[in-house]
Amino acid sequence: MTVMIIFICLAVLYSALKIILEKRLAPLDAVGEDGDLSDVAFSSGLSVYTLFQKAGTLWQFSHARIDNDFKTYLYTGHIPGYVRLFVKQQPAKTRDRTLSKLIYSGGRPPYL
């Protein structure tokens, strides 16, 4: 009987600690435009290169320029303006990849 009570207490403690840490560490997930770019790619199921291609196609850039900008991004981490604008045009929910947002796509879980 005491083993069962201890197990239940540990499960409740684990759940409470998990909720507290998620709420406290969630603001640390924001890593800027590079994080937004990877979050949009992750949530849409596309690669970052494909996002570069889509953004460049909207601006009617040549494939050579898009490839060159992507290579520059890989070497320096600089995100071109047209890609930044494309990422900002995506819905805000696609730029948030915290665990609770991934599991509960409707927003915050009911216990938070």
Image (tube, helix red, strand yellow):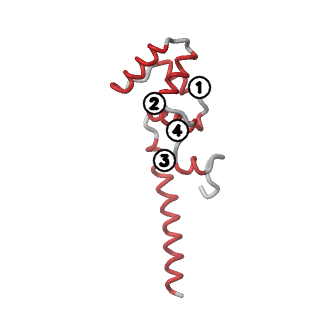
Q: Is residue 100 above or below residue 11?
A: above
Observer-nearest of 95 and 20: 95
Q: Residue at x 47, y 27 (%)?
A: 49
The answer to whether marks 3 and 1 mark residues whose Cβ atoms lie closer than 8 Å is no
Q: Which residue is mark 1?
A: 89
Q: Is residue 4 above or below residue 107?
A: below
Residue kind at label 1, given as amino acid type: Gln
Mark 2 and mark 4 lie on one chain; the one further toward the N terminus is 2
The answer to whether marks 3 and 2 mark residues whose Cβ atoms lie closer than 8 Å is no
Q: Which residue is mark 2?
A: 33
Mark closer to the observer (1, 4): 4
Res 42 label:
4
- Residue 92: percent from left, percent from top: 59, 34
Q: Quadrant of the N terminus?
A: bottom right
Give the Cα distance between marks 2 and 4: 14 Å
Q: Secondary structure at mark 4?
A: helix
Mark 4 and mark 3 lie on one chain; the one further toward the N terminus is 3
Mark 1 and mark 2 lie on one chain; the one further toward the N terminus is 2
Give the Cα distance between marks 4 and 3: 18 Å
